[in-house]
Amino acid sequence: MMSRLPDIPLTAEANSFVEGIRPRLQEELSKVQRTPVGVLLWGPSPASLSLIAALRVSLRADLRQDGHAAFLSEELCDPNSPVSVRIQEIIQAQQFDLVVSIPSSAGSIAEAHDFAADRRVSSKMLVFLNRQHMRGYSSQSLEALSSILTCQLLYYESEEETMPIRTAIFREVQRIREMKYIVAGRY
């Protein structure tokens, strides 16, 4: 919080200057908020009855509502391609700004582990692990791989408490949105 500054009135010319830039300030702030972030959402199939599957679908809708290009990987995979799903997903991940992985089983944690070890996509990954799945090789390896330069690993308590997941994703999306604005201004 800013301490109270002494009230020193502006000259008419200075006040005119400030009134002239206020609309431009607001337009630039609005431009930041209109910058789309590409978000790829990995996790259980939307057809499953899992609460995490429902969360993925909800996140997709909410992110799109906020102006982002949010997709489930299933929407982008070509079942008729001779290329494996794994390679299709690596290719997809390379094209997005953020890859959110919410594995809900030991097998899907192993899948997240494989992708987190791939330098082409690991720095884009935000991985959420349920504390109930912390044991085992894959979750321990994910933790060992997690650093400021690679995937971010966050834990959540249970599938019933998804607000921390949602909050972390929207916070990261906003950071990326702002970084895209900064980088765009340099060219």
Image: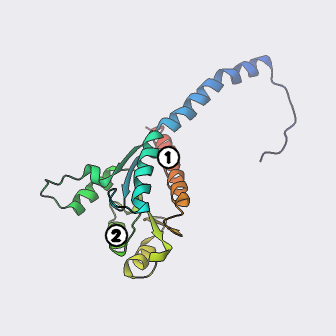
* Amino acid found under the numbered disc labelled 1: Met
Q: Quadrant of residue 2?
A: top right
Residue 90 placed where, x, y %?
A: 28, 59
* Amino acid found under the numbered disc labelled 2: Ser
Tell me, yes or no, if residue 137 can be seen here: yes
Q: Which mark is residue 164?
A: none
Question: Is residue 31 depicted above or below 52 in this figure?
Answer: above
Q: Quadrant of residue 107?
A: bottom left
Q: Quadrant of residue 127?
A: bottom left
The residue carrying pointer 1 sits among few (fewer than 14), some (14 to 19) or many (20 or more) residues within 10 Å by Cα, namely: few
Question: Is residue 134 depicted above or below 61 in this figure?
Answer: below
- Label 1: which secondary element: helix
Tell me, yes or no, if residue 37 can be seen here: no
Q: Residue at x 61, y 30 (%)?
A: 25
Instruction: Choose between 142 and 109: the one closer to the eye.
Output: 109
- Label 2: which secondary element: helix
Residue 183 placed where, x, y %?
A: 46, 43
- Left or right of 128? Residue 164 is right
Count the marks: how many? Answer: 2
Nearer mark to the viewer, of 2 and 1: 2
Instruction: Choose between 87 and 28: the one closer to the eye.
Output: 87
The residue carrying pointer 2 sits among few (fewer than 14), some (14 to 19) or many (20 or more) residues within 10 Å by Cα, namely: some
Q: CA distance from mark 2 to mark 1?
A: 30 Å
Q: Residue at x 72, y 18 (%)?
A: 16
Check the picture and name the quadrant holding the C terminus: top left
- Left or right of 178? Residue 47 is left
Question: Is residue 14 depicted above or below 81 in this figure?
Answer: above
Residue that badge 2 annotates: 108
Residue that badge 1 annotates: 179
Spot the residue most to the bottom: 136
